[in-house]
Every structure is written in structure tokens, then in C-alpha cells.
Image (cartoon, rainbow, N blue to C red):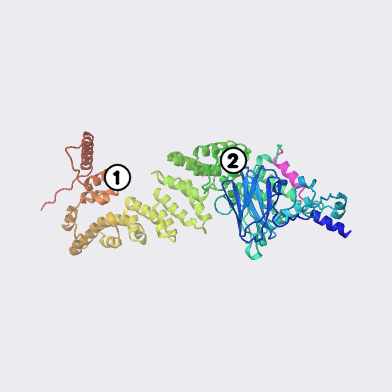
Amino acid sequence: MTLVRVVLFFLFCPSFAWAGTVLSGDHDGFTRVTVPVENINDWSLTRTETGYDLRVAAPLDLDLTRVFQRIRRDRVADVSTAGNVFSIKLACQCRATAFSFRDRFIVVDVTDESVPTPNRSGQDPFLPDAATTSELMLPITVGGPAIALDRGAIAAIAGPSIDLVGFERSLVETLAKASTRGVLTLTGAGGAQDAGTAPVMSATPDRPLQAAPGLVLRSARDVPEVAPPPDLCWSEDVFDVTMWYGDDVPFGARLAQARAVMTDGSDRFDPAAVEALARAYVYYGFGQEAIRTLELDGVQSRSRLALRTLAQVFDNIPPASETLRTQLNCPGMAPLWALAADSARPSPAEWDVNQIMQKFKTLPGHLQVLIAPRLAEGLRRIDAPDAAKLVLATGQKEALFTTEAAVVQTEILVADGDVDAARAMLFAGFSEDPNMPPDDVLRLLNMMLEDDDRVHDAMIGRLEDLIFANRNEPIANELRTALGLAYARNGDLPAALASLRAAATADGDEIMPAWTEVSKRIVETAADGSFLDFAFSGDALRPNAEVRNMIAARLLTMSLPERAAVLLAGPATGGAMGERRYLRAMAFMQMDDAAQAQIALAGIATSRAAAILAAEPWPPVEDEMDTAWRDGDWVQLSGTDDPLLQSAAILATRPPIAVDPLTPLSSGRALIADANEARATVDALLGRFQLPPPITQ
């Protein structure tokens, strides 16, 4: 019995050749050649013009007679040895790889180009394939008699068969679980090396486990606590609400059916029923209700994450876009929901507008109405205004006027340049919705203030209500400032000042424009009594330098130089500083201090300065630009919004044009046109500004 086992062991163990014998075999997709080598630590495989050379350290003494006993010459055409080189001549467009085995053999695999390079460094090179096993007749000794296989003895020793399919499935599941927990990382197979003069394969003795291909081992210290989810496309049905129901069951009946099966006989929540009820809520646009339903049992899944995301989109709850960002380039409705959720700041991804519009048109009417404003805003921000208009029109077919849609439509009209229509559209939303957000109300008020008409009393009442409702919010001061501007526009200056004083706790730079506007209107329209109350209060110091100059100028006309001097004491720049020097000199002259007046006008040699120092009347200056024109302040005139004064400043400051008599006729025509334009500018200036009367001695 022992002898039989020994015989069977040699029958099925890898077949060993005598030293110096090269063996070979044909396999599915590759041909294997096994070369025995004495010193296996130094070898290399390089490409040649006809095949490959296996170069070793010591000279080779090989028996090549058995090479072509088991292989055809369709891959390996010939083999030869020369010193320490074993050459393989190829008969096909093939590539060769090599690895060492048991420190005694170098195994060369010649593989077809169409077949991926196999990784067989851990296989026994002498195992026969299935085609040759049935005809296998191995001798115990080389050249000895063949021994027929005893199938019965083999079956008796083999014992029960092993379920390799189940073992493979178990191994794959174990590797997948380890990869999910971060214990190891599955890596892709490396590409084939380029064939060249460099060695294709080098000596690679038995590798450590950490270097095994396809696996990277880690310890618990190397693994982060949470791994990011893969950016893969989810199934389309989790985001496509049109695929959820194929019937027309009414809203109430569908919810009743879903609620009826929420719990089982033990009063425990059925996860499937909970998800079904949440899906019904999402389908009809009830986001908060769907989220609360999903929280009943605490079950987590990808489909539930998709439902929660859609619920956040419908009720505009952040951060719905975070889940959808990974689905921007996927088919289905995910890009539509992503743009609607992130309409305020769409990412720079390439949005497929056609796909979004096609999916939007397939939505139920109630969902079109729900997301139309935000989707239109997103389309507007990615430069698709036509698609945004179409979405708004489609969404409003079955709904009443909505403020959110009015705001988006206003943005589109402003971008088109139709400001009047935009103001009318936003005011319509203001009239329909008593709960319009404060930001939109302020936007409408700013558009109203651009006209010269009175502010509607409804707007003033709404601002007062919003101030009370948001009295503890940061926006309250902004609302008070806007209310002050509205009061000033309607002529209620005391109420305007009171509203601005209430907002004075805010940053002064933020409400400076409001103080300037209200103060300027007080100087221009208020009666003397109201004006003096304002001029002698601390509020007169709040506006900018130009308006303080206006307040001081009116005080000087009322012979109140002391208060005017206080207002003129602050800093100023540009044209405001030039006007301030004149006003300071006038204040000093009214206070009989001619010396200080001369100091204030030092370096100014204009007729107006001479008149002030002579204590003679000077026609009132209607405008600051008039003063700059009379004084020749071209720098200030170049910064004005008046086209005529800008043209005059350009004419006065540009260098003279050198005329060359040899210039072409086209240049001469340009000079003539330029001269005519300059003449027209001068005529317009002389007709607009009257020269002051001459000063008589």
C-alpha cells in the first residue's frame, strides 16, 4: 500500500527534469518554457530582433531535445544556447515574461499580444493543462518505461471533492469586506512593460506577502475613520419620480394606503412601509414630512439617502447639493435636482441643458411648479436665459403667481435691460405675497428709489412690519436705513431722520450714503426752521464732505458763520476740498477775520477768490461743476458724469496735435472732424455757462 502511494505521489507531483533538461508545454493563450539554472540570483530577460534572450550568470549546459515534444511552433519557432544566453526565436507577434521557481528554474511564458499578461509567479510551472492530463504518461525516470494511470486508485486517494465555487465566493466576499473597512486596498493590475534593451524581467525571488500583486496590507493605524463614498452613478429610478407610480391614485388615498401598513402585528415599524410613505410624501413635494418619516426607524440605505436628498431639494434645505454633486455627469434626473438645489452657486461643471429640460417636462405638474423658480435661477446663472424663461412659463401654467418666480423673472428682465418691466414684475410679487423675504423687499425699494416718484405707502408699511418682525436680526438696521430713505423721498424728513438715528448703531460706512441722501434733501427742500434744527444737531456731521459743504453754504447765506466753520473743519478731498477753501474764507470774512480768509485762499488766484477777499457779492454757485469750470479744474471735470464737461476736460488736457503736410487724406479728414467736434464743444460750453461780471475798481 505504501508503495502505491509513493507511485501515485510521483505521478501527480510536478514533473522534475534532470539537470540541464529544458521542458515546455502549450497552454490556453501562452506557451511555457522551463529552463534549469544553477545560480538563479542573477538573470535577466531582454528583447531581441527575433525574440528574447535569457541571460544568466554561469554558462549553460542544456538538453534541448525535449523542447518541441509537447509544443507546436506557432509561438516558439526555435530555441538555442550560446554561453550563458538562452535564446528564444518567436514565430508570432507575442511577448514574453519570466519568473523564478524554487530557486532552480526560470520559467518563460510566451503570450499572445491579444491576451493580457498573466501573473503566474506563484504557480507551479510543471502542472499540465487539462488537454494533456488525459493523455499523460509520465515516467518515474527519464527514459524509463511509461506507466498508465490507475483512475480508481486516484479517486480513492483524492477523497471527497471540494466546492471551489463556494470557496471562491467566500474569498471574494472576505476581500471585499476587508477593502470596505480599509484593512487592505485592491489595486489594478499593472500594464505590460515596453520591450526594449532594458531587462523585461529581473531576478525576483519569493516575495514577501506585502508585495503580493493586487493587495496592499495596512494596520488599523493607517486606516482613516471614514472613507469617502465612491463617485459612481446611482440607479436612475432612485431620482426619477416619474418611475415610482404607474397609476393615478389621489394624494389622500395613496397616503392612507401607505399609513395603514406602517406597523406590523407587534407595533414595530416596517422598514419597507416607512420608505414607501416617505416616497409618497416626496412624490407630492412634502419634504419635511418625508424627512420626519424616514427618522421613525433609523434605517439607512442608498434609496433612503436619495429620498432625503429629494426632500431637501423640494423644501430648499441645505445641503442637498452635496449628495448630488457626484451625479452631475450621470444620466437621468440627478443633474436636474443638482441644479435646482445649487441654483445660488452652480458649480463649473458642464451642464447638459437639453437633458435637464427634457427631464423637467416629464415631471408631474405640481413638481414643475415647486422647483421651477430655483431651476430657472440655476439656468440663468449658467447663461441659459431662454431655457430659464421656458421653465418659468411651464411652471406657472397650473399655479398662481409666486414671489419666488417673480424674483427670478425680475433678474432675467434686468439682464435683458428692461428695468421698468422688472420693477413691475417685482412689485406684482410684492402685492401678491405679504410674506415676501426682506431681501426682495429691499431690492424692490431700491428700484423704486431710482425713479422720482413717491414711494408707495404699502412699501412703507411693509418696511415697518419687517423692522418689528426682525428687530433682533442683523437685517433690522438695513431695513431702518431703507425706511429712512423712503420717508425722505416722500418728504417726511423728521421721520427719515428718526429712522436713520435708530440705525446709527450699524457701521457708519454702511449707512453713509443714506445720511448723505437725506441730508441733501433737507438742505434743498426743508424750511428754515427745520433746516436750522438739523444744522445745529449732531446729524449734520454724518453726511459726506460735499453735503457738509452744502449745509455750510446755506448757513452762510443766513449769516451763521460760526456753525458753518464747525462743519467746514473736517477733512475733504478733491473738488470738495477746493469748494471748502472758498467757504472757509467766506466764513472768516463774515467773522471779520480777513487774515484767516487770505490764509484759506492762499495760492488761489481766481476771480471768485478776489471777490471774497474784497467782501463783494458773488453770484451763487449753482453747482460744484460750475465752480470747477470757472476755475479750470480739468482733473475734477474729467471725473464728472457730464459728457459735455468730460469732453471739455479732454480737449484742455490732451497734447497738441502735430500736423504733417505729408499725411494721407484720411488723416486730414479725421483732423477736420476732430476740429469740428472741438468747436461744437466750446460753443455748447459758452452757451451753458455765463461769464461773471467784471470786477470794477
Amino acid under disc 2 = Val
Residue at (18, 43) in percent of width and height: 658
Q: Which residue is most to the bottom?
A: 221
Front-lying residue, 150 or 406: 150
Side (left or right) of 635 relative to 2: left
Q: What residue does disc 2 label? A: 369
What secondary structure is found at the residue carrying circle 2?
Answer: helix
Front-lying residue, 237 or 395: 237
Residue at (80, 46) in percent of width and height: 134
**Could you say where residue 490 lies in the image, as x and y percent from the top left?**
40, 48
Badge 1: how crowded within 10 Å, few (<14), some, or many (20+)? few
Q: Is residue 39 magenta?
A: no
Q: What residue span does the magenta drawing correspond to?
A: 249-263
| Residue 202 quadrant | bottom right
Q: What residue does disc 1 label? A: 642
Badge 2: how crowded within 10 Å, few (<14), some, or many (20+)? many
